[in-house]
């Protein structure tokens, strides 16, 4: 690596559908210099993503960390969908940007916001390398057996219908952090990562390489999520269209925005669901039970996929904070070599920690994810190389 000693900072921009998250990191010492979030884009004073990015630039300037700083080495951007084209962090050129735009039909909610973030940052600092880090990239190593849907191959290839997976930056970060926590070589570690946030996905990682993940063509497949159904018989869509008279767009909205925990009980926040369950609320209990049932199935499936599991790691909002979800997911799984220590599990913490018993053959960990730091690391590695 060949980094200039004066240019060690990386700005990470995570431009989502209705918010922009950012972090400024100094890669020389790993310090986080600034972090923030601009929310509710389009709803109030922040009219659009361009305005949001300008606000980020203003917030940084106000802290004396302006985007014009000569210490900045690069800007790293989260891009949700990289298709089959992007499997590595990529230096953004006009050609790369055009390719990312071509992928918009695969991620209509996410890629446009990512693209705007890139365009504004390029306008603000045209001299600076801008790097795209793709949510799908970590999963590009999945074998065809896991990545293919069992449909006509020509049709699948013509329309790019295959399993891409998402949250890859988080799965990459957490699987590395788990090996570190266990004091094991990453290449020797088999891990099931459960990223449980408002969106949720599981992945099976063998020696740092993703071999299966629960999200597919889009982030709709797999686990039960805050507002997304996860796995469902695709014939339910035909049924809702033919018998329910619903349009494709209505069904899209139903499955992505009005399903999951929200659809089952009216709340998508696990804290509220826990509170309601405490009051004996049956709908909240059902939502929790469906959520846990699906998770347990994936833990079993990925144990079979990996053959040998060294660790199961919980991360993201629910995974890091809900002892009840962790306990219920792994309860009674001694048959898989999993034993959660209920006292350790109940302890709160902000750093990576083990919650399994001393003798549990499979370690169980809680690992706070840090997608922005992982994007910064990958960005800095690329521009320094
Ligand atoms: P994320 O998408 O990773 O930011 O996760 C957001 C979700 O985490 C929220 O919708 C909540 O359901 C969940 N969450 C956050 N804090 C807690 C907590 N203390 N207990 C249970 N769930 C939580």
Image: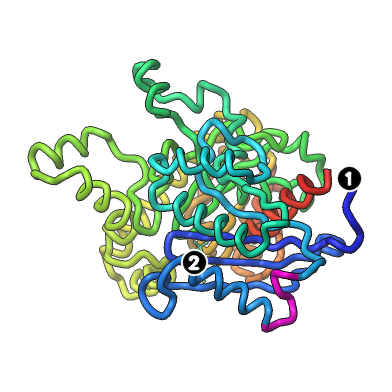
Task: Work out whether residue 283 can be spotted.
Answer: yes
Q: Main secondary structure of the magenta part?
A: loop
Q: Is mark 1 within 8 Å of ligand 1?
A: no
- Closer to the camera in the image, 204 or 64: 64
Q: Is mark 2 within 8 Å of ligand 1?
A: no
Q: Which residues are magenta?
A: 62-68
Quarter-of-image position of residue 41:
bottom left
Q: Name the quadrant of the N terminus.
A: top right
Residue beneath disc 2: 50
Is 148 displayed left or right of 127 in the figure?
left
- Closer to the camera in the image, 232 or 277: 232
Question: Who's the residue at 54% across and 52% down the image?
Answer: 195
Q: Name the quadrant of the C terminus.
A: top right
Furthest residue in direction bottom, as rendered: 62
Q: Secondary structure at mark 2?
A: helix
Question: Who's the residue at 67% across and 76% down the image?
Answer: 60
- Dot 2, crowdedness within 10 Å: few (<14), some or many (≥20)? some
Question: Who's the residue at 62% across and 30% down the image?
Answer: 141
- Closer to the camera in the image, 356 or 332: 356
Precedes in sequence: disc 1 or disc 2: 1
Quarter-of-image position of residue 95:
top right
Q: On screen, 209 above or below 9? A: above
Query: Residue 73 location, x and y as percent?
Result: 78, 58
Residue beneath disc 1: 1
Question: Who's the residue at 62% across and 35% down the image?
Answer: 87
Query: Residue 193 location, x and y as percent?
Result: 59, 46
Residue 211, label in figure: none
- Dot 1, crowdedness within 10 Å: few (<14), some or many (≥20)? few
Q: Is residue 198 magenta?
A: no
């Amino acid at each position: 690596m060949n980094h200039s000693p004066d240019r060690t900072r990386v700005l990470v921009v995570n431009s989502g559908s209705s918010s922009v998250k950012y972090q400024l990191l100094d890669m020389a010492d790993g310090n986080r210099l600034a972090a923030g979030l601009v929310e509710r884009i389009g709803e109030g004073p922040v009219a659009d993503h361009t305005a949001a990015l300008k606000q980020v630039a203003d917030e940084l300037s106000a802290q004396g960390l302006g985007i014009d700083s000569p210490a900045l080495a690069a800007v790293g951007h989260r891009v949700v969908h990289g298709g089959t084209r992007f499997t590595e962090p990529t230096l953004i050129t006009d050609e790369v940007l055009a390719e990312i735009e071509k992928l918009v039909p695969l991620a209509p909610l996410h890629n446009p916001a990512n693209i705007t973030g890139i365009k504004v940052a390029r306008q603000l600092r045209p001299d600076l390398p801008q790097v795209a880090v793709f949510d799908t990239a970590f999963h590009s190593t999945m074998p065809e057996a896991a990545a293919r849907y069992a449909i006509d191959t020509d049709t699948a290839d013509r329309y790019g219908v295959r399993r891409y997976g998402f949250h890859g930056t988080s799965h990459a970060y957490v699987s590395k952090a788990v090996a570190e926590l266990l004091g094991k070589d990453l290449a020797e570690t088999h891990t099931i990562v459960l990223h449980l946030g408002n969106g949720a996905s599981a992945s099976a990682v063998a020696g740092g390489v993703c071999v299966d993940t629960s999200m597919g063509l889009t982030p709709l497949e797999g686990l039960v999520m805050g507002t997304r159904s996860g796995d469902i018989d695709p014939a339910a869509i035909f049924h809702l269209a033919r018998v329910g008279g619903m349009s494709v767009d209505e069904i899209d909205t139903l499955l992505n925005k009005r399903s999951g925990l929200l659809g089952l009980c009216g709340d998508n926040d696990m804290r509220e669901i826990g509170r309601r369950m405490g009051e004996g609320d049956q709908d909240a209990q059902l939502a929790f039970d469906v959520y846990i049932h699906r998770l347990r199935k994936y833990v079993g499936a990925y144990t079979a996929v990996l053959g040998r599991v060294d660790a199961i790691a919980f991360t993201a909002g629910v995974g890091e904070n809900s002892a009840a979800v962790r306990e219920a997911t792994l309860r009674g799984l001694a048959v898989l070599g999993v034993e959660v220590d209920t006292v350790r599990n109940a302890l709160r913490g902000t750093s990576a920690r083990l919650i399994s018993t001393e003798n549990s053959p499979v370690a169980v960990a809680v690992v706070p994810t840090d997608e922005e730091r992982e994007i910064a690391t990958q960005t800095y590695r690329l521009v320094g190389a």
